[in-house]
């Protein structure tokens, strides 16, 4: 079920529900993709557009390059943890390492699969983005420009 799971406990069915949240684009309406104002203090990484296009040509290719799972803090969605990054993958090329938790993009929190799809689409079609990443307990911002 969307936002719910049914469990059978001692021959009784229990349903756990996750509250719906309002959805909005990770990109500000009417503005081109780009780093958020707070991202200026972060690391800037230039990525060749050819690498982006080759590695993200389809969802299957992207999903085969690393494992991304929802990450929770205190039972609340708090981004997506990246693990099992393959050598030469787009994840490696943009500087992510195993254990990084992608918590936001362009100053908007990532909490759902829909948010991750928008992030994927931003990489495919945008000219720059800013990722908020928790790396070993430290908050870091990675600014990407695609050339």
Image (cartoon, grey):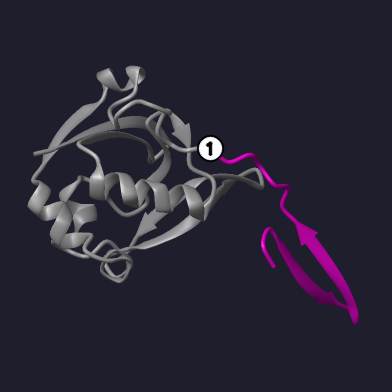
Q: In this orientation, which residue lies closer to the viewer: 32 or 41? A: 32
Q: Position of residue 42 (x, y in %)?
A: 26, 25
**Residue 66 vertical position relative to residue 8 in the rendered view, above or below:** above
**Residue 25 vertical position relative to residue 53 in the rendered view, above or below:** above
Residue 80 left/right relative to 55: right
Q: Position of residue 120 (x, y in %)?
A: 33, 52
Q: Position of residue 38 (x, y in %)?
A: 35, 18
Q: Residue at x 38, y 26 (%)?
A: 30
Disc 1 secondary structure class: loop
- Indicate yes or no whether the magenta region holds residue 7: yes
**Residue 118 vertical position relative to residue 58 in the rendered view, above or below:** above
Image quadrant where one finds the C terminus: top left
Residue at the spot of label 1 = 24
Q: Residue at x 87, y 74 (%)?
A: 13
- Would you identify the image quadrant in which residue 65 lies? bottom left
**Outermost residue to the front:** 30
Q: Residue at x 66, y 42 (%)?
A: 21
Q: Which contiguous range is marked in magenta?
A: 1-23
Image quadrant where one finds the N terminus: bottom right
- Indicate yes or no whether the magenta region holds residue 97: no
- Would you identify the image quadrant in which residue 35 lies? top left
Q: Residue at x 57, y 48 (%)?
A: 72
Residue 131 left/right relative to 125: right
Q: Position of residue 24 (x, y in %)?
A: 53, 37
Please count the marks in the image.
1
Q: In this orientation, which residue lies closer to the viewer: 42 or 104? A: 104
Q: In this orientation, which residue lies closer to the viewer: 68 or 60? A: 60
- Would you identify the image quadrant in which residue 132 lies? top left
């Amino acid at each position: 079920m969307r936002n719910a799971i049914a469990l059978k406990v001692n021959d009784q069915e229990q349903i756990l529900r996750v509250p719906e949240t309002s959805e909005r684009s990770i990109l500000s309406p009417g503005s081109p993709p780009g780093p958020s104002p707070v991202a200026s203090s972060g690391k800037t990484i230039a990525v060749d557009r050819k690498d982006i296009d080759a590695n993200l040509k389809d969802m299957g290719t992207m999903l085969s390059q690393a494992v991304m799972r929802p990450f929770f803090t205190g039972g609340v969605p708090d981004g997506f943890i990246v693990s099992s990054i393959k050598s030469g993958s787009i994840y490696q090329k943009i500087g992510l390492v195993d254990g990084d938790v992608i918590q936001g993009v362009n100053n908007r929190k990532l909490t759902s699969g829909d948010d991750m799809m928008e992030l994927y689409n931003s990489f495919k079609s945008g000219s720059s983005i800013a990722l908020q990443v928790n790396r070993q307990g430290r908050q870091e911002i990675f600014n990407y420009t695609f050339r």
